[in-house]
Amino acid sequence: MGSTALRALLMSKTLGQHHGLPTSIVITTTLAELEAGAGRALTAGGTLLPMSDVIQLASHAHNYLAIFDKDRTLALYHGKRIATPEQRLALLGRHRGCTRPGCTVPGYWTQVHHLEGWLAKRRTHIDELTLACGPDNRMVELRNYITRRNAHGDTEWIPPRHLDHRRPRTNCMHHPERPLKPEDDEPV
C-alpha cells in the first residue's frame, strides 16, 4: 500500500477500535532524534519508521506526548484542546462536580475547564484541568475570574476583588466526606 493510500485510510476515521482505543499508531523515539528530524522511530507493533515519515504522520494526527524516566511514566500530554476520555474520567473521580464555590452541578453535567486558558499553553494536561458547569466555565473569561490548583490539589476560584474580597475559595460541596476545616472559611 502506498503512503498516500495509507494516509487516506488512517485519516478516514473508519478504522474502528482495537482493545477499546481508537485505531492508532503509537510511535516511540528520542527527543534528540525528533528534534534533528533524523533517525528512526519504533511503532508499538515493532515497525521501524524513518523520522521523516513520523513527522509527516504526526502533522495530521491527534498527538499525545508521554514522558518517561526509564520505564516509569512521568506525564501524559494531549496536543488538542479537548480533554481525552481518560482525562475526563480522572476529573470526574477527583472533583465529582463543578468546582466553583457554592455550585451544586454534578460531574455528569460539567465541562472540562483549563485552569489557565488553553490558548496560554496550547496543551491539555490533567494537572491543568478541572470541572466547571457551562455557565461557570464561561464566567471565568467573561468576568475575569482566575482558577488555579492549590497545594491540596483543590481548584481555587478567585473572583475580581470588586466582586468578592474573600478570595480564593474552593468548593467542598461534592466531597461530603471531607471534614470542614477552619481555614476553608478564612479570607486569604
Image: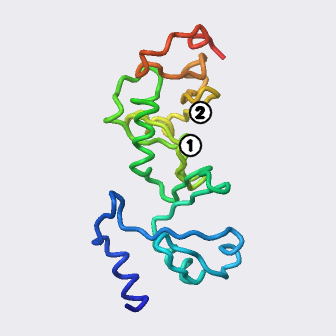
Residue at the (56%, 28%) spot, across then down: 156
Residue 106: x %, y % from top left: 34, 29
Gap between marks 1 and 2 measured at Cα: 8 Å
Give yes or no for contact between labels 1 and 2 (Cβ–Cβ under 8 Å): yes
Residue 131 sits above or below residue 124 on the image: above
Residue at the (57%, 13%) spot, across then down: 184
Identify the amino acid type marked 2. Answer: Arg
Residue 105: x %, y % from top left: 34, 27
Residue 73: x %, y % from top left: 59, 51
Task: Name the mark on residue 149.
Answer: 2
Foreground pick, 111 / 141: 111
Task: Name the mark on residue 163.
Answer: none
Residue 103 sits above or below residue 49 on the image: above
Residue 77 sits above or below residue 111 on the image: below
- Counting other residues with Cα less than 10 Å from the Cα at mark 2, is it few (<14), some (14-19), or many (20 or more)? some
Q: How many marks?
A: 2
Looking at this rendering, what residue extends furthest in the bottom direction? 2
Residue at the (54%, 30%) spot, across then down: 155
Identify the amino acid type marked 1. Answer: Glu
Left or right: residue 98 versus residue 146 is left
Residue 60 sits above or below residue 6 on the image: above
Work out which quarter of the rendered image holds the C terminus and state it.
Answer: top right
Work out which quarter of the rendered image holds the N terminus and state it.
Answer: bottom left
Q: Which residue is mark 1?
A: 128
Foreground pick, 16 / 148: 16
